[in-house]
Image (cartoon, helix red, strand yellow):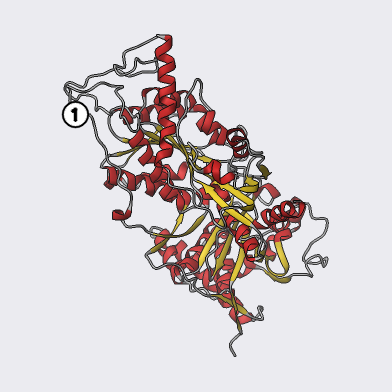
Amino acid sequence: MSKPVESLKEATIRFAGDSGDGMQLVGGEMANTSALIGNDIGVLPDFPAEIRAPAGTLPGVSGYQLHISSFDIHTPGEKYDALVAMNPAALKTNLENLKPNGILIINVGGFKDRNLKLAHYDSNPLEDGSLDKYQLFAVDMNTLTHKALEELGLSAKIVDRCKNFFALGMVFWLYNRTMDHALSLLKSKFSKKPELAEANSRALKAGSVYCEATEQFATSYEVKPAKLPRGKYRNISGNTATALGLIAASQKSGLPLFLGSYPITPASDILHELSKYKHYGVRTFQAEDEIAAICSVIGAAYSGSLAVTSTSGPGLALKGEALGLAISVELPLVVCNVQRAGPSTGMPTKTEQADLMQALYGRNGEAPLPVVAASKPADCFETAYEACRIAIKHMTPVLFLSDGYLANGAEPWPIPKAEDLPEIPVNFAKDPESFEPFLRDEDTLARPWAIPGTPGLEHRIGGIEKEAVTGNVSYDPRNHEYMTRMRAEKIEKIANDIPPTEIEGKKTGDLLLVGWGSTYGAIKTAVEHKQKEGKPVSRIHIIHLNPLPKDLGEILKSFKHVLIPEINAGQLVNVIRAKYMVPAIGFNKVQGLPFFSSEIEQKIDEILESK
């Protein structure tokens, strides 16, 4: 007799274990399989902040959260419907977010006395009744995995590592997922070590067969495909989307792409991804430090390449002086800053939006530059492309902001057609008769881009102040003020290139929420919920943070209250208050974690009820 299948509109699942338990791998495979069958997905990989915390301890827990749905979603979910805990530390750090009566799958084999002690449990939660309000399924995955693989003759250490796929097999059975893609992945991933492919495949199947044979679960669940716009989709992370956006800009502009970078969490994947595209003319250079990386990029820009460097907060600080040089010589390059929790090394694997002030002002002298910020993992493609377009058109360095939540998060991405992307024209200077290194375009105030070695276009650039038009070294006080104001005016004119701000909701009312960066999903979800309740709430999301949109001031003054949620101590809200003189309300979270939409909904209610 077949088990009943309950249909769900959405579900949130959390895999949690020790940092060596492979939670990211199986969580990612659950996400890929769900995307392939047509679910909308939102994910939150949660890495330990320490590179290798002691096994079994609370700081060493690695988690992967997955939100699957049959409709359009914008977040990785909040409370879990199901939690897989591979050891006591994973249970302790995640249990508070499991819904009452939620499904709790525990690997009994990980609940030894030593692990209970490391997780600071005074008694075994499997025996003391503290888990009675959940649907508890305690399974000795260690022993069952060993039994499933005993004929393969592998070492105990290798067999132990396969228990994550036993857990995945159980979750696949519970949510009626096909194993085809996972089996194909294992075959490809371990193509040079077929014994490992076979071991993990057997563990995966064993987990599913265990559920079928033991009938532990009273029911299984299905989440039907979401009705997304027609198109060709792939699952994509923010860092991969950033890399592809840069490549697309390179192809569209006809410029070779050069990335000079120094590895740093969580930006390193941009370097890794781009190194795979040599056949597209992409050149990657792993420099000895951050300063060398950006200096190599300045050279690449000077010689006519689409020049990019990637980093995270501490690395951006080190790039500051050279970034000022790039602003002074007015060359086009893009700096990708994937923000993480700071200051200093802070919490390298945790997310934060605290580099906005550094992006806007973190250089000596008067050194303005454009700043853009991506809003979703897939949006990193469009925003990275936009950063390149602005850099080339306006002859300026551009700061592209992402963060750890976007970089490691993933979602379905409708692959765009190349012909639908905006054009990125490049006009190198060619005429020696009319060439002057700092003779500016009347509309954009951009100076000409001249390739070194072009006959008749020989010129000198450097950090010393330059005379207007000729570019000769100049210490004239009035020329310095003129050039300072001209560089600032050039950046302000980019606002003419920014489309009108889209307002979700009414254009005037009681409350406007203003977001930027990765708060997009939580704010959008919260506002949609409140609008369904009939609350007078609207929303905008700012992509261009410098210069700000020309219509922003008028929009802000059309609402009684302005609320700005940020994953920092209040940075954009200070910019908005200073520039537009509106009493914007800050709502801030600095925990290395993204907002829950429910937190924002609570703040909305608080403001509306206090009016």
Q: Total of numbered circles in the picture?
A: 1
Where residue 142 sits: x, y (%)?
63, 65
Q: Is residue 290 left or right of residue 393?
A: right
Q: Residue at x 66, y 81 (%)?
A: 218
Q: Can you say whether 331 is above or below 92 in the image?
A: above
The three-letter code of the residue at mark 1 reads Lys
| Quadrant of res 94 | bottom right
Q: Residue 337 versus residue 371: which sits nearer the camera?
A: 371
For label 1, the SS is loop
Please tell me which residue lies in front, 369 or 39: 369
Whole-percent x, y for residue 305 in the image: 30, 35
Instruction: Work out whether residue 414 can be spotted.
Output: yes
- Furthest residue to the top? 476
Q: Residue at x 68, y 43 (%)?
A: 585
Q: Please identify the residue farthest to the bottom as the structure is shown.
A: 1
Q: Left or right: 272 with respect to 98?
A: left
Relative vertical location of residue 532 with respect to residue 484 in this rendering, above or below = below
Q: Which residue is mark 1?
A: 430
- Image location (x, y in percent) of residue 313: 54, 35
Picture quarter with the N terminus? bottom right
Left or right: residue 259 compared with residue 49: left
| Residue 273 appears in the rendering | no
Residue 179 percent across, percent down from the top left: 48, 72
**In this image, 108 relative to 23: left or right?**
right
Residue 166 falls in which quadrant of the image?
bottom right
At x 58% / y 73%, what residue is drawn?
9
